[in-house]
Amino acid sequence: MTLTAPPLYRPDLEETKLGEGTFYQTQLGLKPTRKHFFAPIDSTYAEAVNRDAETVEYTDEEEKKVKRKIDRTVLPLVICRYSFNFPV
């Protein structure tokens, strides 16, 4: 399946609940189901997700929120892991 580039303005896509960054995924239809959790993702769906990710633009405020959320989650795990490596 060949995916085409998104047009500059598509009012029908802007008004959907999916929002920004889902143009190529909507071209494929429903999300494919996998046989089990560790089964590989369909390559056309993975390509569509990657192409959509290239078109999304984040504001500085959104980037700060994501970084802060990652720091709140990952930093405590790193500190715990470090403390368990050096028993007292």
Image: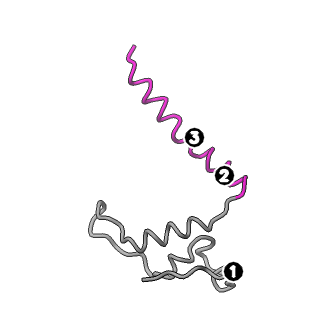
For marks 1 and 3, give the one nearer the viewer.
1
On screen, residue 20 versus residue 84, left or right, reads right
Residue 85 picture location, percent across and down: 38, 23
Q: Please state the extent of the stretch shown in magenta in the rendering.
A: 59-88
User: Which mark is on residue 72?
Assistant: 3
Residue 88: name its quadrant: top left
N-term mark: 1 or 3:
1
**Label 1, residues with CA under 10 Å away: few <14, some 14-19, many ≥20:** few
Is residue 32 located in the magenta-colored stretch of the structure?
Answer: no
User: Which mark is on residue 63?
Assistant: 2
Q: Marks 1/2: CA distance?
A: 24 Å
- Mark 3: amino acid: Arg
Tags 2 and 3 in contact by the CB under 8 Å rule?
A: no
Q: Residue furthest left?
A: 35
N-term mark: 2 or 3:
2
Q: Marks 2/3: CA distance?
A: 14 Å
For marks 1 and 2, give the one nearer the viewer.
1
Q: Residue furthest top?
A: 88
- 10 and 1: which is toward the camera: 1
Task: Give the quadrant of the N terminus.
Answer: bottom left
On screen, residue 18 versus residue 42, left or right, reads right
For marks 2 and 3, give the one nearer the viewer.
2
Q: Which residue is mark 1?
A: 8
Q: Marks 1/3: CA distance?
A: 37 Å
- Mark 2: amino acid: Glu
